[in-house]
Amino acid sequence: MHTQPKNTRGQMLRTVGLSTQTWVSAAFILIACTIISKFFGFFREILIAKHFGASAEVDAYMVSVTLPKLIGSGIGSTLGISLIPLYQKILTHKGIVEANRQIRAIFTLTSAISIVFTCFLYFMPEVIIKTIAPSLPGSTSRLAIELLQWLSLIVLGLSLFYLSSSIYNALHHFKIPAITDLANNICVILALIFLASVWGIYSLVFGLIIGIFLVTAIQVFLLSKRGILGFSIDFKGSELKGYIILAVPILFCDYFYQVVGVIENYFASGLNVGSIAALGYAKRLSDAVITLIAINIARAVFPKLSLLASEEKWNEAKDLISKLTKQLIVYFLPLSILLIFFRKEIVKIIFMRGVFDDLAFKMTANVFIFYMAGLTASILLPIFFRLSFSLSDGVSPLKASIIGILFMVFFNYFLTPMLGISGIALSSSLAVLLSLFIIGMIVHRKLGRLDTQGIMKVAFLSFFCGLLSLLPISQFGISNIYIFILSIIVYFMLYFVLGRFFMKDETIVLWRICKKVYRGILNHAVLLPKKSE
């Protein structure tokens, strides 16, 4: 019998000595920590601007840090994502001893690859800087070369951090990686506060290096203490082959995502001055929602999907992905409608200050419409990609990405002359929708019939309820921030009241949460006078 009993598997994981979280609680933990991390990141950027402004030092830092970050995160996240389904499969069929042995082998492989790239960056900084930024002034170029030698170290730190985080996730533990990730920004902030006046831009560099290695050391130490991590070259050929076969397309998927911004800027460069900037402003707003919600939900549900795949529980996997898709549609389709409706107010609140003039405001608001039109598809795409990865299939997401990018270029060729930068944003949203459709059909074929009819029905009803909820607030002008906030509250109240009638099964989870909160407040209100007496 291949599949181990559920209680035996649970006992094996408990021997590790780590708490486990469900994918729902894991998603909330990751989202909460990401919000805090974004706040620290924003404060960090304020300190950088305060101490260095838009100087040659910052130019040198930005040029020198890009490649180490790209390589380190690419190696770590790729090998980490590939590890999770492999670990679940080995744990299910061969037990925890063999699974941990494979982890040690992968840790050794990751360390070796990272050291090779670290040495390449350290010993050839001049060639690299002259290649990626040939037009830098002489003094800035020399500083960038010096900084790159130091920053080459973060390739090793980042790759091991992402890998160790994935190991925790494979064990269904998310708290330690989420919390330790915050320490990185804190180290940079402390370095800027106390050392910027003495060390200049090097305070930022050393703060980043120390922060990355500190959080990595904490995670690696705790895993090593539990006998999970260590160095080993004992890696069976067949397992290594399957691991690499999955890892390579995942790596290409990650780098193809970087290509999207290059394509957008290419087409925007031929338009009016400020087009690239407006496109960037609108895209950052869109990406903020996607990175906060979609990536964290995908990370949280990935170990669960990998577990179901390893145990060949296809019906449970189909049921989970169908319910999750419906839930995300119910929450994010109305959000996209609301963001489109309030696009001007949102852009004005966030960007309308300083030299951000009316022309930039109009351009950004117009582009924002088309990015938000593809918001729900952008939320779902990473989750379907992780579902495919859990099935040890990295080729299908790669195919969907390539086809999406090719059609993005095709759409841009026709839409950009017609709609300007709005055509670029629309092309990106259409490409995401096409990629989602392709990967959805592949998953539909591999897992068996998904509840596509139910998903389409929920999408239609959610769209209908979202539009209907706009009618009352569209009659009022938004004269101040308080009316704006009140309008948002009224919109969602109306939406979920309508959803209670039209989408009862999909909104029942939210209603249960609201009831618990209401009862908690009520019980507290009743008990409070007794305590005061």
Image: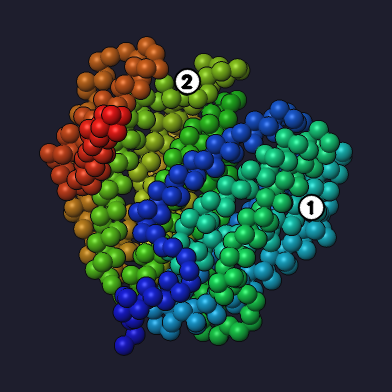
Please say if 239 is above or below 297: below
Specify the label residue 274 is tagged with.
none
Decide which of 503, 435 is in the foreground and name it. 503
Residue 109: x, y in percent? Answer: 63, 73
Q: What type is the residue that disc 2 sits on?
A: Lys
Residue plotted at (55% across, 80% down): 101
Q: Is residue 63 visible?
A: no
In this view, the residue farthest toward the front is: 533
User: What residue sits right under mark 1 in the picture?
Assistant: 150
Please say if 157 is above or below 95: above
Residue plotted at (26% across, 66% down): 316
SS at circle 2: helix
Residue 126: x, y in percent? Answer: 83, 52
User: What residue sits right under mark 2 in the picture?
Assistant: 348
Q: Quadrant of the C terminus?
A: top left
- Which quadrant would residue 317 be assigned to in this image? bottom left
Residue 7: x, y in percent? Answer: 32, 76
In this view, the residue farthest toward the left is: 501
Q: Residues within 10 Å of mark 1 (few under 14, many from 20)?
A: some
